[in-house]
Image: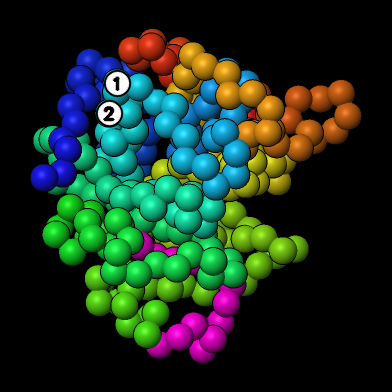
Amino acid sequence: MVEQLDFPLSMADKLKAYLPPTSDACTHQETRVWTTLTFATSLDSSLALAPGVRTVLSGPESKAMTHYLRSRHDAILVGVGTAVADNPGLNCRISDSQHHPRPVVLDPNLRWDINSNSKVLQLAAIGSGMAPWVVTSVPMDDISQDKQDLLCSYGGKYIHVPLSSGAFEWTTLLEVLRDKGIRSVMVEGGGQVINSLLAAGSQAVVDGVIVTIAPTWLGGGGVVVCPDRQAPGLPAARLRDVKWLPMGDDVVLCGRLGG
């Protein structure tokens, strides 16, 4: 039995301004993918105790919020490090929602050994989630047919996107997703993905930022949200239209980048 979560409508209304519009007539959604960046961090900006170590930071209230956010997006995107470390389900467990986002995993070098025991595929098999799209720089002809057939059998697929200067370029990546019917994407992590999205050349594609701040310090050596500065003496990024929402023991920070 998959655990079901409830998120109060009163709290959902406070997040509305930072989420994709529900109207199909929205001009924004006709031109590019609405991108929401969301993650949970400690007081010292750490996402995890160490690379590859699954670290739970969100309390029950903010955890329910995360699943509510998933109910409002077409896709949920994570990096391969998160897929390998957490074996995530990447589904939506809000009790009154029938919607599951499409998992998108950025795996440029095919590090993720996805198989029939992977949680995301097990959930897809019982209708409690969707199979992932795995975005890779590896040419399709170099991906084993067995791997392609396995993913396809659950409703997923591999998608080839070339790298630019050793990494996926966000504008190109989002255009590929839009061409495949994705109108909104929720970026959840991990550290490398988040920091690359907060880099000076990528911030323009971010529409909303929702960060859960847990009342704990993880200490040195963790996976940290720390994008490079645009120039010496200037902040790397700053949010505007900021709203702070207490949520259980956590605090949720909402805002927009730029402008």
Location of mark 1 (residue):
61
Looking at the rendered structure, the kind of residue marked 1 is: Glu
Residue 15, visible in the rendered structure = no
Rendered position, 58 above or below 20: above
Instruction: Name the disc covering residue 113, or none.
Output: none
Q: Nearer the viewer, residue 33 or 52?
A: 52
Q: Which residue: 47% across, 40% down?
A: 54
- Judge left or right: residue 28 versus residue 181: right
Asked which quadrant contains residue 67, the reply is top left
Q: Which residues are magenta?
A: 131-145
Q: Which residue is mark 2?
A: 64
In this image, 166 relative to 192: left or right?
Answer: right
Q: Quadrant of residue 5?
A: top left
Q: Amino acid at mark 2?
A: Ala
Residue in the image at 29% along x and 23% along y: 60
Label 1–label 2 contact, CB within 8 A: yes
Classify 10 Å Cα crowding around label 1: few (below 14), some (14-19), many (20 and above): some
Residue 250 vs residue 218, the one in the foreground: 218
- How is the structure coloured here? rainbow
Image location (x, y in percent) of residue 131: 29, 63
Q: Is residue 159 above or below residue 4?
A: below
